[in-house]
Amino acid sequence: MKRILRFVGIFLSFIFGYILGEAELGNFIDYMIEDFSELDYMSLIGLISSLITVVLFIFYIVGKLFLIKQMKVTLFEKFDLAYYQDTKNDIQKGNYEIVERLDIGESNNEVIYITPSQPLRYLNIYKFDPNEFKKGELVNTIGPVANGHTIQINTYLNCGMPSFSIEFQRFDFVKGILFLAENGKTGILSQNLVLKYTFKSYLYYLVK
């Protein structure tokens, strides 16, 4: 995002500077005044309307870019962590509407509840490759997931290097990657989440 804005700013500055350099600022203003004085009433109204349209379009694009930046740090998913012996109480209380239960890994004494407030297009679980430091073999895939429904994952969170990672795509085409490892700093699992924009997500918010 910053690179795109920087490129657009540099390009516009170059064009504007080139125009002023070729036609000197004083002469350029004189030409503008002369052209305006030669316009009739209807042509002047048309020119002003065109300028207003251009300004409004620029503000529209700037507003959409701010919206995209804001949505990247907005969480629509809730990640709850519990120990397996406590899950029965949570389910009996009706805290979750569980539609899928998965066991991943050899030990399953910890439970992760993933509850989206907006639909998920898909949710994939991968083994984590510590050598390449990226996702490895696909373990399971789920989707789509309706908003309010919960996916229960029984697993064990390592301290340090994760054994698994979860990749999902939100309704707005933003991709999320959750690394399944203990958060030794705060204990909040959602801080292991990384959100990435796709080309479709940019289009989604530009035309929304």
Image: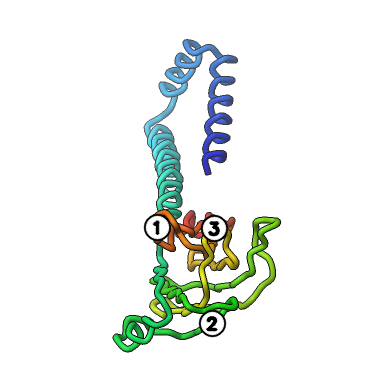
Q: Which of pointers 3 and 2 indicates the residue nearer the eye?
A: 3
Within 10 angstroms of label 3, few (less than 14), some, or many (20 or more) residues?
few
List x then y, in percent, for residue 81: 41, 71
- Is 32 in front, or is 160? 160
- Mark number for residue 74? 1
Query: Which type of secondary structure does the marked residue at label 3 adopt?
Result: loop
Mark 3 to mark 2 CA distance (whole Å): 23 Å
Against 147, residue 75 (above or below) is: above
Within 10 angstroms of label 1, few (less than 14), some, or many (20 or more) residues?
few
Against 142, residue 51 (above or below) is: above
- Mark number for residue 102? 2
Against 113, residue 130 (above or below) is: above
The residue at the far bottom in this view is: 92
The residue located at (59%, 72%) in the rendering is 125
The residue located at (41%, 74%) in the rendering is 115
Tell me if residue 33 can be seen: yes
List x then y, in percent, for residue 164: 59, 68
- Which residue matches tag 3? 160
Contact between marks 1 and 3 (CB within 8 A): the answer is: no
Q: Which of pointers 2 and 1 indicates the residue nearer the eye?
A: 2
The amino acid sitting under disc 2 is Leu
- Is 147 in front, or is 160? 160
Nearer the N terminus, badge 1 or badge 3? Answer: 1
